[in-house]
Amino acid sequence: MKLFVDTMDSSVVDVAADGRVRFENEDWSHPTLQERRAILHAAGQEIAALTELIEILQDGRTAGRRD
């Protein structure tokens, strides 16, 4: 997994079941409340973008076609 967190200018590259995260080029750590909120916000935006992608591809829209 790799999630870019824009507000932190960093990428989460792994998450442990106990809530620890590993940012790119850093060791494991427990995120602060502010970091958790930033990660959750970035994840929500990514889910929305991926959902839109899935819907577009499932609808069978072709490249170059404008709706």
Image (cartoon, rainbow, N blue to C red):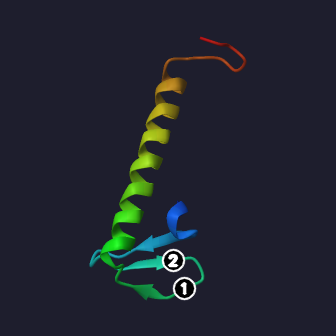
Residue 48 is drawn in which quadrant?
A: top left
Please provide percent x and percent y for residue 54: 48, 32
In this view, 33 is above or below 48: below
Question: Is residue 5 at least partly visible in the picture?
Answer: no
Mark sitting on residue 23: 2
In this view, 47 is above or below 43: above
Q: CA distance from mark 1 to mark 2?
A: 5 Å
The amino acid type found where label 2 is placed reads: Phe
Please provide percent x and percent y for residue 56: 52, 24
Query: Mark 1 — residue?
Result: 26
Residue at the image point whose x is 51% and y is 77% from the top: 23
Is 38 left or right of 9, judged from the image as shown? left
Residue 64 is drawn in which quadrant?
A: top right
Is 31 left or right of 62, judged from the image as shown? left
Residue at the image point whose x is 30% and y is 74% from the top: 33
The amino acid type found where label 1 is placed reads: Glu
Please provide percent x and percent y for residue 13: 51, 71
Residue at the image point whose x is 35% and y is 72% from the top: 34
Q: Can you name the residue that lies furthest to the bottom here?
A: 27
